[in-house]
Amino acid sequence: MSAPVKGRAGFSRCGRYRYWLRREWDDTLPQCAFIGLNPSTADAQTDDPTLRRCMGFAQQWGYGSLLLVNLFSFRATDPAALSAVSDPVGPGANRWLRRAGTESQLLVAAWGNGGQLYERASNVAYLIEHAQCLGVTAQGMPRHPLYCPKRARLIPYQPPG
């Protein structure tokens, strides 16, 4: 029988921003981190499809925990909503991107084409210099895990430009 998955999450005081989400299933194995576009519905207890797919990749690769951070910390089920708020990044987002890179053995860029919004992906490239990805889109952005086969292989992520 496998150990239960422990969940934790970090939100802003107002609850509109989620800075990080963590799942741990084996504390004897290293941590893997994914950088998504923006948080959706997942929290400390509830998983969403993207989180489940990222966990599947992390488990397949031999990791015991997952840290999920995002380019934009504003919670929205539709990424188009990021354009409608005054601060979709949120205070503290870059700090968590940096932590993901320093605290995780593997860093996976996984935000899809939405990273072009406000040139966010380019603006944080210095924080994620050693990131891998599951392939790139025609625009050169890292592919979103939901749109990758379960056996996708990691490649080094090279920001466009």
Image (cartoon, rainbow, N blue to C red):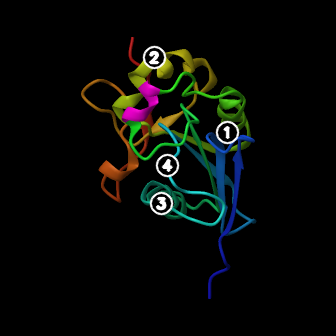
The image's mark for residue 125 is none
Q: Position of residue 144 (x, y in %)?
A: 38, 43
Category of crowding for the residue at label 4, using alpha-carbon neighbours closer than 10 angstroms: few (below 14), some (14–19), many (at least 20)? many
For the residue labelled by badge 3, is the local secondary structure a helix, a strand or a loop?
A: loop
- Span colored in magenta: 80-84
Is most of the magenta stretch helix, strand or loop? helix
Q: Which residue is mark 4?
A: 40
**Label 4 or label 1, whichever comes before in sequence order:** 4
* Left or right of residue 62: residue 115: left
* Left or right of residue 10: residue 148: left
Q: Position of residue 159 (x, y in %)?
A: 44, 21
Category of crowding for the residue at label 1, using alpha-carbon neighbours closer than 10 angstroms: few (below 14), some (14–19), many (at least 20)? many
Residue at image point 44% right, 26% down: 84
- Report the Cα–Cα distance between label 4 and label 2: 19 Å
52 or 155: nearer the eye?
Answer: 52
For the residue labelled by badge 1, is the local secondary structure a helix, a strand or a loop?
A: helix
Where 7 sits versus 82, above or below?
below
Q: Which residue is mark 2?
A: 118
Which mark is nearer the camera, 4 or 1?
A: 4
The image's mark for residue 48 is 3
- Report the Cα–Cα distance between label 3 and label 4: 8 Å
- Report the Cα–Cα distance between label 1 and label 2: 22 Å
Where 18 sits versus 29, above or below?
above
